[in-house]
Image (tube, rainbow, N blue to C red):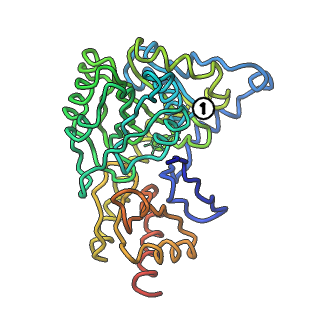
Amino acid sequence: MSYEYERVATPRSGLRLHLNENTAGCSTRVLEALKTMTREDAAFYPDYTAAIDACAVWLGVGHDRVLLTNGLDEGILAASVAAMRGTDGGRPYEAVVVVPAFDMYAACVDAAGGRVIEVPLAPDFSFDPEAVIAAVTPRTRLVFLTNPNNPTGQGIRRDAILAIARHAPHATVFLDEAYADFAGDTLIGDSALDRLPNIIVGRTFAKAWGLAGLRVGALIGSAETMAPVRRVVPPYSLNAYAARALPAALADRDYYDWYLEQVRTSKDLLYDALQTLSIPFWNSSGNFVLARFGADAPRVMAGVAARQVFLRDRSRDPGCEGCVRIGAGVVAHTEACIAAIKEVLCGAP
Ligand SMILES: *Cc1c(COP(=O)(O)O)cnc(C)c1O
């Protein structure tokens, strides 16, 4: 079995609701900061002091617990390389991935020579910590948990995360909080992390902060758990523009609060529309909604694409037959998306 990230075609124009991006674009303060870049800034290797400090302050942790990465993707890759290095007497180390999941976990573990152990969610996508614990073996070195999960939008309870970390002290629990901004729920700053140093939390500034194109992510964890991961990340992983952008982005809380509100309103609009259309969906803690169009899924995907609205077909994911993931960002975009879905399903107005 080989695992590869499914690259999707990038539409040149139209509504990109297929990659959970921030559909408003970044704060204008980011562009202002980038305009101050000098010839030397482009020519010299970047200094990360300001970016790390801004990230540490934002997350409320000491700067020594922060590792900035070239997008959270690089953090996932680095954690995978660090954990899967070597073998257990010739047998590969294992990483537990709860599916359906973000594709990068399996892709990175596989690329690092590890073995992916998939644990399926329940049919209603609820999270069962016992199923994860049952999959942990002496060779487990990594457990990927995503809170809230992509593509289901479902959360994981704090006590479930802690129970898994407690049960697998020989493994790193990689808690991907890519959508924590929208969920308003994080383990960062939780006193339990002091007792469970084997948890690394991953964050990204791609989604809520709109920096996906600049590539900025962060790992937060104890010095001992982070040390092998730090050795994997190249010293100048973020480029100078990303490093300049991050403090500027984090300084614009008004923009961030506005965007979170847009996402909340958009999700409510989507729930209402899907309910009216009798399309089953899952309430989401992220900036997207997973809906089960069933046999209509290919027709909906093609029909909305013809109307320049791009969604993500997740129907090949385990347990996601007939499911489409709809990005929920700027309200006007969501309204256009809903109109397109209605046209496809109910006929042109
Ligand atoms: C988008 C996403 C990431 C990757 O974020 P980048 O910072 O853009 O690399 C990581 N994890 C999950 C669950 C995501 O959905």
Location of mark 1 (residue): 245
Q: Going 76% across and 19% down the picture, which residue do you hit?
A: 44
Q: Amino acid at mark 1?
A: Ala
Q: Going 49% across and 35% down the picture, which residue do you hit?
A: 109
Please indicate whether residue 273 sits to the left or right of residue 349 in the image.
Answer: left
The residue sitting at the front extreme is 89
* Nearer to the camera, 19 or 5: 5
Residue 167 image offset from top left, x and y in percent: 23, 25
* Nearer to the camera, 171 or 2: 2
State the SS at label 1. helix
Residue 20 image offset from top left, x and y in percent: 47, 52
Q: Quadrant of residue 223?
A: top left
Q: Is residue 111 above or below residue 330?
A: above
Asked if one can make out residue 41 in the rendered structure from this viewpoint, the answer is yes
Q: Is residue 257 above or below residue 169?
A: below
Q: Going 24% across and 53% down the picture, which residue do you hit?
A: 122
Residue 57 image offset from top left, x and y in percent: 43, 21
Asked if one can make out residue 251 in the rendered structure from this viewpoint, the answer is no
* Nearer to the camera, 147 or 267: 147
Residue 318 image offset from top left, x and y in percent: 37, 56
